[in-house]
Image: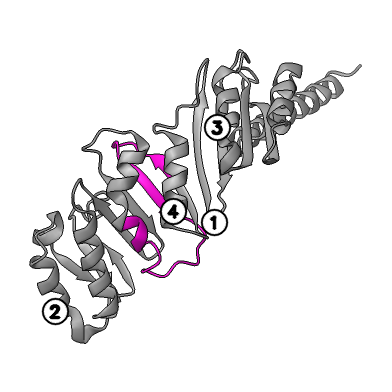
């Protein structure tokens, strides 16, 4: 074979190999970038899902077990359950007593008799799912305070009990019963008595300390009913990107001065914060 032909063949082969390697790298990067999941079935995990599904009051079970690129090891498992509040205890007991050997990410969507939906989640690895609070009493209390609402409960990174309305239909006044009930929610959750309770939704956010629930409720109700406030984010829920903690509200311009006076006279932790009005 002539030398020039061999050289051309070698170049073509090298180029083809480089393209294949590059293509494989691009594909692998794509798999990692979008966290592509590859199912990994496990009869023991399937049996756990079937046990949950057999409990009366369970209306839906979604289970998944998978690995991710690039290592394809250490399978992840998740199990999401929709259950009535009357049967939550039985599902919880099963989750706590499960002998499934691997960690499971549990999600709970609990439907109360008042058609409130309360969701929460936690990881279980040889014990009860670690949701950070007592689930059944919290579900009961939220159902009492917020009939017909969709509410998520969680313990957030800075040890706040977060109670969030999540159906996207909320006006600022709809979460007010949860604000008024913040002390009852804290007690129901079984958390430290000093734990702040953050009540939040698209149009309202407030962090309520022990003994502050009714005062926050009354202030918010006045700002909404008397001064026409439509969005109220009363600070305490993390420092904004400009580094300045503040109260932020949307309200008619003619009421701005009165709103500032109400907040300053409230005696609440937000009394000394600057007030910014949203356009």
Instruction: Identify the image quadrant of residue 104.
Output: top right
Task: Say which label, 4 or 3, has the lower sequence index.
Answer: 3
Mark 1, residue position: 114
Q: Nearer the viewer, residue 38 or 225?
A: 225
Element under disc 2:
helix
Instruction: Identify the image quadrant of residue 115.
Output: bottom right
Classify mark 3: residues with Cα within 10 Å, few (<14), some (14-19) or many (20+): some
Element under disc 1:
loop
Mark 2, residue position: 258
Task: Say which label, 1 or 3, has the lower sequence index.
Answer: 3
Give the left or right position of residue 139, taking residue 191 as reference.
right
Foreground tag (4 vs 2)? 4
Instruction: Kindly report the distance in space between the C-alpha atoms of the residues bearing marks 2 and 3.
Output: 49 Å
Instruction: Kindly report the distance in space between the C-alpha atoms of the residues bearing marks 4 and 2.
Output: 34 Å
Q: Inspect this view and state whether residue 88 appears.
A: yes
Q: Position of residue 20 (x, y in %)?
A: 74, 28
Mark 4, residue position: 144
Mark 3, residue position: 89
- Can you say whether 138 is above or below 22 in the image? below
Instruction: Kindly report the distance in space between the C-alpha atoms of the residues bearing marks 4 and 3.
Output: 18 Å
């Amino acid at each position: 074979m002539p030398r020039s032909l061999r050289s051309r063949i070698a170049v073509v082969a090298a180029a083809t190999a480089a393209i294949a390697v590059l293509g494989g790298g691009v594909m692998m990067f794509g798999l990692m970038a979008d966290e592509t999941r590859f199912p990994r079935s496990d009869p023991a995990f399937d049996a756990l899902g079937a046990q949950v599904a057999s409990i009366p009051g369970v209306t839906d079970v979604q289970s998944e077990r998978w690995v991710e690129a690039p290592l394809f090891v250490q399978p992840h498992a998740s199990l999401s359950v929709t259950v009535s509040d009357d049967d939550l205890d039985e599902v919880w007991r099963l989750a706590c007593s499960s002998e499934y050997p691997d960690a499971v990410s549990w999600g709970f969507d609990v439907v109360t008799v008042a058609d409130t939906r309360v969701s929460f989640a936690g990881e279980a690895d040889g014990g009860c799912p670690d949701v950070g609070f007592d689930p059944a009493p919290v579900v009961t209390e939220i159902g009492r305070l917020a009939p017909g609402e969709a509410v998520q409960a969680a313990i957030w990174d800075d040890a706040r009990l977060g109670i969030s309305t999540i159906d996207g239909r909320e006006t600022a006044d709809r979460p007010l019963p949860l604000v008024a009930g913040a002390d009852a929610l804290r007690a129901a959750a079984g958390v430290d008595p000093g734990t702040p309770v953050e009540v939040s939704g698209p149009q309202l956010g407030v962090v309520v300390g022990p003994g502050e629930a009714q005062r926050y409720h009354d202030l918010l109700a006045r700002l909404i009913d008397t001064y026409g406030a439509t969005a109220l984010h009363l600070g305490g829920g993390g420092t904004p990107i400009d580094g300045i903690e503040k109260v932020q509200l949307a309200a008619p311009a003619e009421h701005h001065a009165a709103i500032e006076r109400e907040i300053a006279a409230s005696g609440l932790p937000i009394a000394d914060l600057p007030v910014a009005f949203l356009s």
